[in-house]
Image (cartoon, helix red, strand yellow):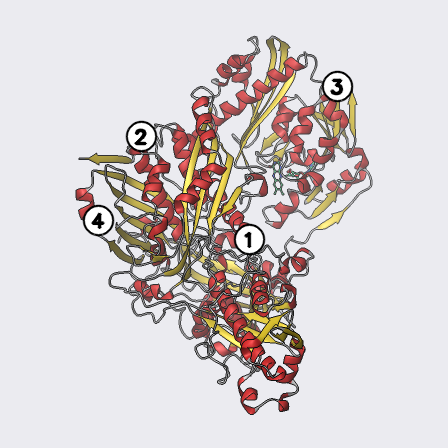
Amino acid sequence: MLLASVDYTRPATVPEALEALASREGAAPLAGGQSLVNVLKNRVASVELLVDISRLEELRSIEASEGSLEIGACVTYDEIDRSPEIRAGHEIVSRVASHIEDQQIRNRGTIGGNCCLSDPTNNLPPLLIALGATMNIQSGSGLRQVAADEFFRGYFLTAVEPGEILRSISIPALGEGAGAGYSTLSVASDSKAIVRAAALVRGNGTIDEARVALAVVGPVPIRHSGMEEALRGGAATADAAREAAEAIGEDLEPIADAHGSTEYRRQMARVVARRAVDEAIARGGENG
Amino acid sequence: MSAPSAPSAPSAETVVAPVEPGERLGKWSGKSVPRTEDRRLLKGQGEFTDDVWMHRQGYAHFARSPHGHAKILSIDTSRALSLDGVHAVLTGEEAKEMCEVPFFQIAPEPAGRLEEWPLAVDKVRYHGDAVAVVLAESRDVARDAAELVEVEYEPLPVVVDTVAAADPDAPLLHDEAGTNVAWHGVFDYGDIDWALENADHVVKIDRLHFHRFSSTPLECNAAVVNWDPGTGVVDVKSNNQMPMFASMVIGPTLGVASNKLQFASQDIGGAFGNKIGSYPQIAALALLSRKAGRPAKWTEYRQEHMLTAGHGNERTFLDIEVPVLKDGTILGFKVRAFDDAGAYLHYEPLGAVIWSQVTPGCYRLKHIQVDYTETLTNKCPTIPNRGYSRLQHLWLIERIVDTVARELDFDPVEVRKQNYVQPDDYPYETPSGCVYDSGDLPRSLEVALELIDVKGWRARQRELGTGSGKRIGIGIGSTLDSGTNNFGQARIINPDLPFSGNGEAAYVKLDLYGEINVDIGTTPQGQGHETTAGQVVADVLGVEPSAVNVSAGFDQRHNTYVAFSGTYASQFAVTGLGAVLGGAEMLRREIVTLAAFALEADEDEIEVEGGACHVRGDPERAIPFIGIANLAFSNNAVLTPELRERISLNCRYVYTPPFTVPDPETKTGELTLTYASQIHAAAVEIDEETGRLEILDYVAVDDCGRVINPQIVEGQVQGAAALGIGAALYEAFEYDADGLLQQSSFYDYHALTALDMPMMKYADIESPSPFTPNGAKGMGEGGGAPLSTLCSAIQDALGDGDALVADSHNPWFRIHELLGGGADGAPRAVRVESR
Ligand SMILES: Cc1cc2nc3c(=O)[nH]c(=O)nc-3n(C[C@H](O)[C@H](O)[C@H](O)COP(=O)(O)OP(=O)(O)OC[C@H]3O[C@@H](n4cnc5c(N)ncnc54)[C@H](O)[C@@H]3O)c2cc1C
């Protein structure tokens, strides 16, 4: 078969879904299917039972209060792109979601799937890390929270344990004077990322807090504390950003492939990190 | 009377039209008549090979090598066979036993001794090489079963570099050949030693590299093959684009006579030369069908296509020397070229001569020496890919011209204009004896530069200056699309090959009620043959194009053909439409004869118009085509015996170009009939920090002689430009040291999409060919102008830096490296010696 034979179930509630997931060792949640189905087609992973969570209402809501957001794991990229709440408080989340591959994929792919796959080239993980998001993980015994920084564990590996699902993602309010930025270098348009960075900068004229996340430089997106430290306490200027980016150095040992060597990726990490911070500073200024 | 081989069919020589060919063209030819094919294609009513269904068909799936080079120690098919729904499994060894001889080789000895069978025997030679094929009741079961074919391999050392492969100590691919050199020869035109001694400057370039890519057609390869045990007929429904060549290669191998090997196709989803290469699979499917006693259907997966369906030729150029005079005249060049054919010779080593159709490119270069070596490597076999073998050579020449301009401080525009073949040089004989038919290169370049406002971009380039983080570059690419091959050039590769000339066949007939029908020997893949053939016939027979039915696709059972039939190598406008034109003129003469008989008038008084004939000046004395058909088909006792004998209203015409046999000794001859030109220009912006390039402006000026359908021509130009831009920036097939393909899916091989494509400007200039029946030239392939143009633009953006754009593929990291002065520690790749 194109897909090796696999069982399928579509539970009506989250508890039922969790039960189905716990029922068999080879059970896995199916969200938008944009990665999982391809993985199965290429037979690089085997799943015995697909538990379709994509239509569970509890996972499909977007809630905004006082600038913070809670986005259900099965909200699609297209819904994120079009949501007035998200556009109002976290325009950058809408914008990044609106650039994920093509419209067909945006119609089906979900924020939860984008994170739970833990593919180092995916768009949303570095952004969520920079924004200080919290991942709300549900199991039969309750809900636990994991910071986005701690969520990604390795290639195709996250903090979600067997029998659990990611229920939603909470993104704190940006706050006054804060801004976020995002920058990617990719092979072409709508194509594989060579390196990505996302940044959050808080402060008024001087930088009180900076969060810089880099992706496609290793198995999981990482925060670059060296650059963050270099920014903290300094002026919120392009020059400062340029200088701080120099902190990205030999500590980073990115993967090499047909689209870039380790050294090229390291240099490009510096460039996109600086650009993301530049954007964050500019937007923070508008937000003051 | 309708069989193509019927002895009484009139021959072209005896019934040739009395008018100048093409005289009647003009009412419909030359207009953007909407494409006949589009309606069914857009409504999903096309018939592609995967749509074909045969009674009792099984589905085939190939088991393929995960190694770049390995001995096959054993194959165990028992697990595969035990799977429910599996009909049969065929291994390489078994396939060989069922065959009479290996595939015919074009190469002379020693490479000509190479044995290729439908499936790999004893060893695999590249990542993806097919070792067995399974037939099962469904596509899915076949794929599962192929995974269960257990092959024990012993990995062998791998060679993936063409220059290294030529070394006698390199790992050997084919023991029976005893060498990896598929072909070697020196093309020596003019007197390069004299030129190098007498030039004012000699520009030397160490190395240039033209990379591997392909056209990744939307539809992958596919075939449904039935070996009928009752009749012995082998039916092949496939999307192979050169079925006669496929037939001539696999027929003797399978032991099937060509009158029992029946190819057919209707719609084909793009081919670009790549689909010449599916004959080994078709042969394997025939054997599988014979073994299983059922039709075998195979639809290639995309990954399979990228691994195995054929890549374009990769070529490395070494030790380039270019003699130049003080005034900017380039005398020629000398180069050692190494071409990488991959693991088997599919259509190769014809590429080793095909480039010499355009030996001096667009220029009046007189002294050219090319020491050409083609090698076998542990990579996917190459196959003709749009611009086949010429685009590599044309790219070399454009890099030479730009480098000369930069090193010696000439204006790249002026140096081109000065060295181009000039408008009054035509017909222009090149050093290799090819005759460029017509053109106006200087004007094409001027039009191109005006359309992208090159002065404006130059000003913008200066304004930007340093510190902006951006660079502007302006580039030019001048290429040719040589069309209508003289197959006699194969003798330059192997003097023993009994090939020469070219041709295409068409049947034009009236049907029972006077309807017009056309069959051609071609296998269109989107080029709009139904439309343009309809335009030509409409002009000749005085009807509307919609009144002409051109059979969709090709079916060997009823279409007419010659051995050259098919759709490849930029020739339809000449050979295909030449055949249609000849057939239509023959039919017109027969119609006029019958009309004159019926209307009791002289033949030269008969006018043909609006689907009827009338006597000039007397529209009342008329007979419609239905009346003409009635006379010939259902009322023939009223005719004279002489007319009954002579008139069939079924006219077969074979167009043959006026070629002679090239000379293998001097490697000269008329290798192609027409030379369409493509002058492209671009302005690009490069981001200094990342090397990312954006195309700001792009123009293509095309000259393919008389245009039959402007919209179709522009579509071809757009397509060829897109392919070249994709190849220049995004698309490459690269192998690692173990011989594994690194880009075997669209995740890593970014085929250009509409989003990457600039809004291209287009203009056309018409320099009619004096050598073709309709003034048209073949033009579908293009000459890979975007690769030259973008390399030229990148070089321009680098400014005075040392770095040389030495690769045809320039992803961001490579541009970034060039901006930084080139690869670390590499010596300067260009030197100039002046006297
Ligand atoms: C051609 C193509 C190109 C692409 N390019 C990009 C790109 O450039 N950038 C990018 O970011 N993405 C890209 N994607 C991937 C796409 O974004 C996927 O949608 C995403 O990776 C997975 O989301 P999904 O909802 O489709 O999840 P699925 O494919 O259904 O699931 C992915 C994985 O996550 C698990 N999972 C899903 N939801 C949950 C949950 N709530 N709790 C626990 N586990 C869960 C599944 O079990 C599975 O292991 C591309 C996809 C395709 C087909």
- Chain of the residue on which disc 2 is drawn: B
| Residue B664 % position (x, y) | 27, 64
**Circle 3 SS class:** loop
Residue matched to label 1: B710
Q: CA distance from mark 3 to mark 4?
A: 76 Å
Q: SS at mark 4?
A: helix
Queried on whether the Cβ of the residue with tag 1 lies below 8 angstroms from ligand 1, the answer reads no
Does mark 4's beta carbon lie closer than 8 Å to ligand 1?
Answer: no
Q: Are marks 3 and 4 in contact (CB under 8 Å)?
A: no
**Spatial distance from mark 3 to mark 2, Cα to Cα?**
54 Å
At label 1, the amino acid type is: Pro
The residue at label 2 has a CB less than 8 Å from ligand 1: no
Residue A140 visible from this viewpoint: yes
Q: Which image quadrant shows ligand 1?
A: top right
- The amino acid at mark 2 is Gly
Do pointers 1 and 2 mark residues of a single chain?
yes
Residue at 53% in and 41% down: B761
Foreground disc of the pair 1, 2: 1
Dot 4 amino acid type: Ile
Chain under disc 4: B
Q: Cα distance, mark 1 to mark 2?
A: 51 Å
Distance Cα–Cα, label 4 vs label 1: 42 Å
Describe residue B88's horizontal placement relative to residue B127 as left or right: right
Which kind of residue does numbered mark 3 sit on? Gly
Q: Examine the rendered structure and indicate whether residue B176 appears above or below residue B727.
A: below
Q: Which residue is mark 2?
A: B825
Q: Earlier in the sequence, mark 1 or mark 2?
A: 1
Q: Residues within 10 Å of mark 2 (few under 14, many from 20)?
A: few
Q: Can residue B399 be seen in this snapshot?
A: no
Question: How many neighbours does mark 1 have within 10 angstroms: few (below 14), some (14-19), or many (20 or more)?
Answer: some
- Pointer 3: what residue? A67
Q: Quadrant of the C terminus of chain A?
A: top right
